[in-house]
């Protein structure tokens, strides 16, 4: 083949190799990261005030009490005694957030993109061979 179609074949083959060689290990690494991640759960926490600081007091699923103190500027609008919903990591209860966590896994996302690119380039290469 000559012309643009002749140059397209090697580019598609190179992109299919790049997609597969880099994408599949990233997908496997992303799955491992996703499986090792601990689940988050929510509980009700109470706002308390101590020594000019405000904090949250809550118990995890094993009834272990936890406390966290914050600068009053970080807890504006929360009065002592207020109950709030708090989300925490079950494996590491000291990791918590006021909103639900985002389970982002960029390794898995990039792996799927590269693997999909490899598959599309392979299919396009076979279609190019037919013409």
Image (spheres, rainbow, N blue to C red):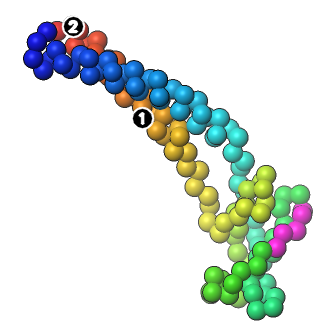
The quarter of the displayed image where residue 113 is located? top left
**Which callout, 2 or 1, points at the residue further toward the start of the chain?**
1
Look at 69% across and 84% down and name the residue there.
Answer: 71
Q: Is residue 98 left or right of residue 106?
A: right
Q: CA distance from mark 2 to mark 1?
A: 26 Å
In the rendered image, the quadrant that contains the N terminus is top left
Query: Disc 2 designates what residue?
Result: 130
Q: Is residue 106 left or right of residue 92?
A: left
User: Start and end of the magenta stretch?
Assistant: 63-67
Query: Disc 1 designates what residue?
Result: 113
Residue 13, percent from left and from top = 32, 18
Look at 62% across and 61% down and name the residue there.
Answer: 100
Q: Is residue 27 above or below residue 102?
A: above
Q: Is residue 53 above or below residue 88?
A: below
Residue 65, percent from left and from top = 88, 68
Look at 72% across and 47% down and name the residue there.
Answer: 38
Tell me the SS state at disc 2: helix
Name the one closer to the observer, 40 or 125.
Answer: 125
Tell me the SS state at disc 1: helix
Name the one closer to the observer, 7 or 101.
Answer: 7
**5 magenta-colored:** no
């Amino acid at each position: 083949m000559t012309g643009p179609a002749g140059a397209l074949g090697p580019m598609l083959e190179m992109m299919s190799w790049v997609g597969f060689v880099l994408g599949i290990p990233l997908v496997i690494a992303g799955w491992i990261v996703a499986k090792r991640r601990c689940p988050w759960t929510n509980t009700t926490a109470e706002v308390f005030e101590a020594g000019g600081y405000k904090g949250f007091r809550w118990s995890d699923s094993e009834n272990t009490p936890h406390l966290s103190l914050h600068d009053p500027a970080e807890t504006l609008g929360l009065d002592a005694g207020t109950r709030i919903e708090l989300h925490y990591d079950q494996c590491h209860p000291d990791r918590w957030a006021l909103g639900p966590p985002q389970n982002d896994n960029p390794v898995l996302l990039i792996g799927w993109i590269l693997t999909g690119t490899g598959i599309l380039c392979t299919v396009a290469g076979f279609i190019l061979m037919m013409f």
